């Protein structure tokens, strides 16, 4: 039987009644924008993450744009981030008129290499966007020390890491602000676009609340030029249902990941592949379970032949994207990220995946690397 990379249909069927009731409730109320569901979701997520504020917005990309703007990042500023992430992590730096500066990644966690950041800090550097890639957190203890030393803002791109922890603190809650995406395939995904910023900084929160609603505090009186960037009530009602399952689903992802680690151990010892790296201080949420192998193409072809999905995250690092050609990077500048892009392969890892399916997938990988 076919195995998808993520089984949203199976997930929906497991909570169908609750979801359908929630959506019907919103239709019944006829409150569609910035109503009680959005407010309740904001309260629930800020309480969960341990921040003073949560502000729901239209998507995870806007969450980054608004957070950057609320931190007063703009033209002339430089913002450091990872080249090994989804495009939006750096696109949004350019969106606010600032310059993305890429620092190579750690070969084990695939997150920003903290040791390489300092060399790229200049008098123009204003902020760092650490990206908790695939649900594995950046070393936030070391990053925050560096940020304090250089007085840099930290905006955690936690789009893939809602519920992950570093030394007991939730992803997104450690820096000045943290952002989430509720894109359908994320660990907490809606049935459409959605996003959120969390922060304990009153000024940042107030600014983002204004920016998401046309720069306006009192209706029809606009203090500045903002955006229309709101989460709608239907999405919020769906997300509130799914949020109740988030910890359970994340725990299940960790169990599947640990089982893969165990099954794949012989191949790791033979040097044929690596599995997601561990940081003893972090609690990951495995948004994706990403293998690395020089034989990635062969594994992918063999899996696809058996109707098993897999995915390349990411095929091209951000410093080599056409859109950033003006920044002047070239091949060889960030070798660890470049190599990861030739080796990384995500295999199915989601709560509804069965033990038998995992074993079938691993068998195919063993045969492919034989
Ligand atoms: C998904 C994602 C985003 C963007 O979120 P959208 O809701 O799709 O706008 C940003 N950063 C990372 C790391 C992501 O994975």
Image (cartoon, rainbow, N blue to C red):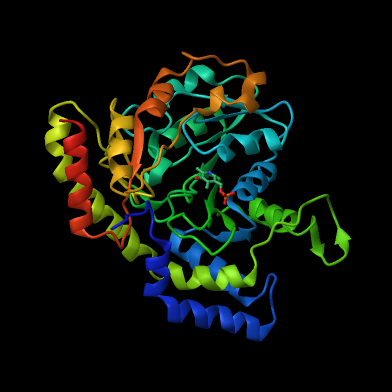
- In which quadrant will I find the N terminus? bottom left
Q: In this view, does 146 lie above or below 256?
A: above
Query: On the image, which quarter does residue 351 sit in?
Result: bottom left
Camera-nearest residue between 285 and 355: 355
Query: How many marks are shown on the rendered structure?
Result: 0
Q: In this view, does 96 lie above or below 163?
A: above
Q: In this view, does 297 lie above or below 334?
A: below
Q: Is residue 113 left or right of residue 355?
A: right
- Residue 236: image x %, image y %? 57, 69
Extreme bottom residue here? 28
Extreme front residue here? 305
Q: In this view, does 202 lie to the left or right of 85?
A: right
Q: Give me the residue at 61% from left, 61% from top.
A: 56
Camera-nearest residue between 138 and 244: 244
- Using the rendered image of the protein, determine whether residue 34 is visible from the camera's viewpoint: yes
- Residue 234: image x %, image y %? 60, 72
- Using the rendered image of the protein, determine whether residue 113 is visible from the camera's viewpoint: no
Q: Give me the residue at 37% from left, 51% from top.
A: 5
- In which quadrant will I find the C terminus? top left
Extreme right residue here? 221
Q: Is residue 220 left or right of residue 305?
A: right
Camera-nearest residue between 266 and 10: 10
- Residue 364: image x %, image y %? 20, 42
- Residue 201: image x %, image y %? 59, 52
Camera-nearest residue between 348 and 128: 348
Q: Give me the residue at 64% from left, 81% from top.
A: 27
């Amino acid at each position: 039987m076919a195995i998808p990379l993520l089984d949203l249909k199976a997930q929906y069927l497991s909570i169908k009644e609750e979801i359908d009731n929630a959506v019907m409730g919103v239709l019944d109320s006829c409150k569609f924008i910035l109503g009680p569901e959005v407010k309740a979701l904001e309260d629930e997520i800020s309480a969960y993450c341990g921040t003073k504020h949560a502000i729901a917005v239209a998507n995870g990309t806007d969450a980054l744009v608004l957070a950057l703007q609320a931190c007063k990042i703009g033209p002339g500023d430089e913002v450091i981030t990872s080249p090994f992430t989804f495009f939006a992590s750096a696109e949004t730096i350019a969106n606010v008129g600032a310059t993305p500066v890429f620092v190579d990644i750690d070969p084990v966690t695939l997150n920003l290499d903290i040791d390489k950041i300092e060399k790229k800090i200049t008098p123009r550097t204003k902020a760092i966007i650490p990206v908790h890639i695939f649900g594995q957190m950046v070393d936030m203890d070391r990053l925050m020390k560096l940020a304090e030393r250089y007085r840099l803002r930290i905006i955690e791109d936690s789009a893939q890491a809602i519920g992950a922890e570093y030394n007991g603190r939730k992803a997104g809650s450690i820096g000045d602000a943290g952002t989430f995406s509720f894109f359908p395939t994320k660990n907490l995904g809606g049935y459409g676009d959605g996003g959120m910023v969390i922060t304990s900084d009153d000024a940042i929160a107030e600014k983002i609340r204004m920016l998401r609603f046309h720069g306006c505090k009192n209706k029809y009186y606009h203090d500045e030029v903002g955006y229309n960037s709101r989460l709608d009530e239907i999405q919020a009602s769906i997300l509130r249902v799914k949020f109740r399952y988030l910890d359970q689903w994340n725990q299940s992802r960790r169990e599947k990941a640990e089982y893969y680690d165990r099954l794949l151990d012989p191949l790791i010892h033979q040097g044929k592949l690596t599995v997601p790296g561990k940081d003893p201080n972090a609690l990951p949420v495995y948004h994706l379970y990403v293998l690395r192998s020089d034989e990635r193409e062969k594994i992918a072809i063999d899996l696809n032949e058996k109707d098993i999905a897999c995915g390349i995250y990411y095929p091209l690092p951000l410093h080599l994207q056409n859109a950033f050609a003006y920044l002047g990077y070239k091949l060889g500048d960030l070798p660890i990220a470049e190599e990861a892009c030739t080796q990384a392969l995500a295999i199915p890892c989601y709560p509804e995946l069965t033990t038998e399916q995992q074993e079938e997938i691993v068998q195919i990988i063993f045969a492919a690397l034989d």
